[in-house]
Amino acid sequence: MRLVAPVFQLYRTLDEDLVWWRMISPNGRGIARTVTPHPSPDAARQSIAQVVGSIDVLSASLRVTEAYRWRWVLALDGVPAVQGVSDQDRRVRCVHAWRNFVLLAPLAEVDPTTYAFRRGARAVDRAASMSGQT
């Protein structure tokens, strides 16, 4: 059986010029993403390289959300750099999720494409129709 590593993917939304990155699993599910956007694809790639190069010194913090679920964040020199894409239902699963990121990130390649997504178009359309602005 051949091991398929996750991939770092760069993306932006159509309504802004900032670039985000995320790490996705081979089946397309999100694992982690950058905490803050970057001004360009090159800056996002540098951020990925910095995170991966500092993987051994990232510090993890876990917190309970308002919905009583768990969320993880990894910080570099006290500054949040990476966070989990989704909340976990148990603390132990949250710990497992960030440890998976730490193990898999050095194996992941960076996709050369920067993808563009429409942010919340359905939500914006729905809000406009509810207020009679369509």
Image (cartoon, grey):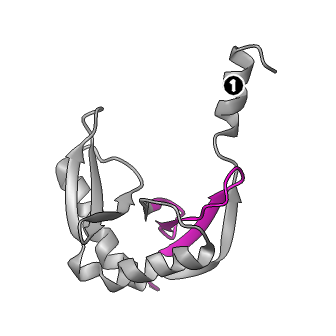
Q: Horizontal placement of 111 versus 85: left or right?
A: right
Q: Which residue sits at x=65%, y=46%?
A: 119
Quadrant the C terminus occupies: top right
Q: Is residue 2 magenta?
A: yes
Disc 1 marks a residue whose amino acid type is Arg
Q: Position of residue 85 (x, y in %)?
A: 42, 54
Looking at this view, is 101 or 48 the one in front? 48
Residue 46: give x, y in percent of width and height.
49, 81
Magenta stretch in the rendered image = 1-30
The spot of residue 47 in percent (x, y) is 45, 76
Give the image quarter of residue 99. bottom left
Q: Which quadrant of the figure contains the N terminus? A: bottom left
Q: Residue at x 64, y 60 (%)?
A: 12
Classify 56 as above or below 23. below
- The outermost residue toward the left is 92
Determine whether 44 is above or below 130 in the image. below
**Structural crowding at the residue carrying mark 1, measured as other residues with C-alpha within 10 Å and reported as few (<14), some (14–19) or many (≥20):** some
Residue designated by label 1: 126
Which quadrant of the view contains residue 77?
Answer: bottom left
